[in-house]
Image (spheres, grey):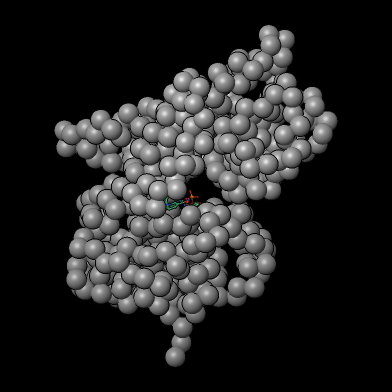
Amino acid sequence: MTAKKVAVLGLDYVGLPLALLFAKKGFEVVGLDIDLHKIDLLKKGKSYISDVSDEVIQNESKLLPFELYSGASAFKQCDYVVVTVPTPITKEHEPDLQALIHASEFLKSEISKGQTIIYESSTYPGTLEEVILPILEQSGLIAGADFYLGYSPERVDPANDTYSIDKIPKVVSGHTGACLQKINEFYKEVFQEIVPVSSPKVAEMCKLFENIQRLVNISLVNETNSLCEQLNIDFSEALQAAATKPFGFTPYYPGPGIGGHCIPVDPLYFVWKLKQNGLTSELIEAAHQINEQMTKKVVERAKQRLAANEKNILIIGVAYKKDVNDVRESPAIPICETLLDEGYEVNYYDPHVESILLKGRKFESVELTKEKIDVADVVLILTNHRKVDWKLVKEAKKIVDTRGVLNQY
Ligand SMILES: NC(=O)c1ccc[n+]([C@@H]2O[C@H](COP(=O)([O-])OP(=O)(O)OC[C@H]3O[C@@H](n4cnc5c(N)ncnc54)[C@H](O)[C@@H]3O)[C@@H](O)[C@H]2O)c1
């Protein structure tokens, strides 16, 4: 029997591990991306995300990477199509569906009868059936009869060694019963546990709510942490003690603010959907505001430790969370930019991030040396990567530790 074929559109933090998983499970995988640089790297056996090694790419002969349009004929032969393109937010905090619409326009012109198409990008409830379905049906083919359409939210957690993607229960939905059945058949071959829900809207809402819950709880923990500081209470000890409760309590940990492509963004997709319907969520709006204020609070904490003539700040970690190389929506960016605006000399060290753009200027990670630690007027810890030599960091004369990482050393 010949192997079934899967096309994956969008090969980054979500799409690349997924494409490699499909290949591992025996599917032939056509990987499509608009970013030629990424396609070139994959063809050379090089990875560009921290969770995937070069070796894994080099050993995987079932993954064939193509620039989107040059992969059209390979795409047509695929049985399954999985869409993992970005869904960011505009400056006005509105959903930016450009990539989803662009990918759907491509599918509309290249779709083959019988294909099963699954969208995995996080988005507001209603996107699949109100925005995407009408585009795909402009092909003249009908979903549920000529092709199959569904939504399955992606739950990958970069740098999480405990839950690899095939072990995370997979929520699936279909536009029709026949669509759901096709998606079920496919994903049963890939994931350990399938969780079917009654409609794409429910599956879309499920993903948003997972991240809304995190935004609200992380904002709560950050606010409580700074209130406890003012009351002179050791919040990290209180949190540690609370976390021993074996039921009904999930610990979230303080930090410099929420980053990444999901948690700060997805709740705003829901807020937008609410506004379209004349509704609001006071709790989500408040949590968002608390998160927005974190930059200012962290900058103030660093400045309070400095005398008027002390200007040299060494930042440890600019990625939005530990052990990843992703700086999207990372609080480190506005924190560094604010410090630069205020005339401070800012250097950073991040073992996963070679360079970043701050105020349009490229900054490269410095090496972490005793000399760099000694020369810094304050060391500001923003990300708790495992690879950092924390014992060396601890030798700094002044430290602001937004992650509480030094308590472990
Ligand atoms: N990163 C995460 O940890 C995570 C976790 C769960 C869900 N998600 C969701 O999954 C989706 C993808 O996330 P990501 O972090 O991989 O996004 P990303 O921005 O890192 O990458 C998506 C890839 O899609 C490519 N792309 C853009 N437009 C395209 C098009 N029209 N056709 C083909 N390729 C295109 C980009 O070049 C990029 O390589 C988003 O909706 C995100 O919210 C992300």
Is residue 144 placed above or below 408 in the rendered structure? below
Tell me the residue at 40%/73% (across/down): 192
Is residue 327 placed above or below 380 in the rendered structure? below
Horizontal and vertical percent position of residue 169: 37, 65
In depth, the one of 95 and 373 nearer the eye is 373
Is residue 290 placed above or below 42 in the rendered structure? above
* Residue 335 left/right relative to 142: right
- Residue at the far left: name it: 278
- Whether residue 94 appears in this view of the structure is no
- Residue at the far right: name it: 371
Q: Point out the image quarter for the N terminus.
A: bottom left
Q: Point out the image quarter for the C terminus.
A: top right
Tell me the residue at 46%/57% (across/down): 156
Quadrant hosting residue 344: top right
Tell me the residue at 49%/32% (across/down): 235
Tell me the residue at 22%/37% (across/down): 274
Horizontal and vertical percent position of residue 111: 34, 67
Instruction: Please give the count of numbered marks on the rendered protein.
Output: 0
* Residue 305 left/right relative to 185: right
* Residue 205 left/right relative to 9: left
- Residue at the far top: name it: 308
